[in-house]
Amino acid sequence: MTEAPQGEARVSLRRLVGWGLIGQLSYVISQFLLLVALARYASVADVGRFGLVSAITLPIYWFFNLGIRANQATDTRGTFSFHEFLVLRIVASLVAYGIIVLLAFTVVDPLARTVMLVFGAAKGVETYSELCYGAFQRADRMSDVAISLILRGFGGTALFWIVIAQTGSTSAAYGGLLLAWVVVAAGFDLTRALRMAQGAGDHGTVRTKVVWKLAITSLPLAFNALLSALQGASPRYVIGHFLGLVALGHFTVVGYAMQAVTTIVNAIGQSIVARLAHYVSSGNRHAFRRTLRRFLQLVAVASAIASLAMLGFGNWVLVLIFGADYAGQGALLALVMIAAGTTASATILQSGLLATRRFGLNLRIRIVSFVALLIGSVIGALTLGLPGVVMGMIASAALQSGLLWETLRRLPFETGDPR
């Protein structure tokens, strides 16, 4: 594994990624168990309905997250204080939840409304944990991120299981998830992050003009995150519209494999982006490229193994875990794993581009790949059904990876201004 630059970082990259993977693996497992509970105690249509709710809610929060975590992690000069990030986080999260409330009463049916309100509140609380993770990352304290993810993941899932098993209500179950996330965000994340800020000399002074500047410079990251979320959500919109809620329920369960892989690879990207930024600022092109190359090789091997395994055993796994309602989807699961690997490669390459702080350039690449995904998903749904949608996802991710690779190859190796 690539060594840290001398004098710039004391924690090895191997350890940073290790803690990042521990936290995200725990979170992925916990969310997988939550999905099992949902599939076991609710109908396929109810699972599809939740898939639609999350597809509406997540892009809103991803935009209003404003890329604060990545912005903190790559702010190696300490231009903005934690409290300035916090003020922006409070305002943005309140606006995001207000939009979710409006949509809950105007767009979705009454069966989905309560779930959307409660789940939306839980995701709003999560944004404060994400804020703190950015501070932890910048200080190379990925162990704190891991501990928080373990507490949030398993604590929330345990309450979800207990409530849904006792009441059969998905809304009440997500209320249990919300409670657990509030406790962890307030009792662990914010407490530690504020203590770190105070130790660094940040005593709560907030410069209004600086917060406004932070919001403006974060907009490219916000639009990039929105398009990233829409890339994940658009296939659900397409499936729900053209193929129906039952097909969306099947895709929500099978597609979790891709979500799990994406979450893990995002953890890798978040773990290495600060280190990559150090390589950029110190002009260490060799370490920068070697780090990206090694993680891309890891993704390629893991994707190939997972796809072959699911081709042989995917159907058996789905029936065993989720029940007979999900029989016959093994080949689709294998295809999803190919899509996950292709998307993971794009995520690793994107971390390299974010490390250069060329946020606007990254956004332009995201726009092109999003348009390709939308077109590919619609054509795929109309011609081949669910497999066609996944093929459209693979083509879009491959295009994004190619554009990112060529961009990184051509960029001069120096820190750029956010634009």
Image (tube, grey):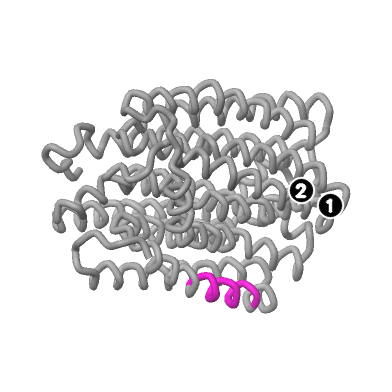
Where residue 194 sits in the image (x, y, percent)?
44, 26
Relative to residue 159, is residue 355 depicted above or below?
Answer: below
Taking the spot 43% from the left edge, 33% from the top edge, the residue there is 205
Mark 1: give few (<14), some (14-19) or many (20+) Cα within 10 Å.
some
**Residue 288 spot, x, y in % from top left:** 20, 54
Total marks shown come to 2
Q: Position of residue 209 (x, y in %)?
A: 45, 49
Residue 207 visible in image: yes
- Amino acid type of the residue tagged 2 in the rendering: Val
Frontmost residue, 114 versus 348: 114
Q: Is residue 205 magenta?
A: no
Taking 326 as reference, is 110 left or right?
right
Q: Residue furthest left?
A: 6
Residue lying at 52% horizontally and 52% vertically, measured from the top left: 310
Q: Do callouts 2 and 1 mark residues in contact (Cβ within 8 Å)? A: yes
Q: Amino acid at mark 1?
A: Phe
Foreground of the two, 101 or 264: 101
Quarter containing the N terminus: top left
Residue bearing mark 2:
101
Reply yes or no: does residue 372 show up in magenta.
yes
Residue 325 at least partly seen = no
| Residue beneath the point at 26% across and 55% down | 292
Which mark is on residue 105?
1
Q: Which residues are magenta?
A: 369-378
Report the front residue among 72 and 52: 72
Numbered label attached to residue 269: none
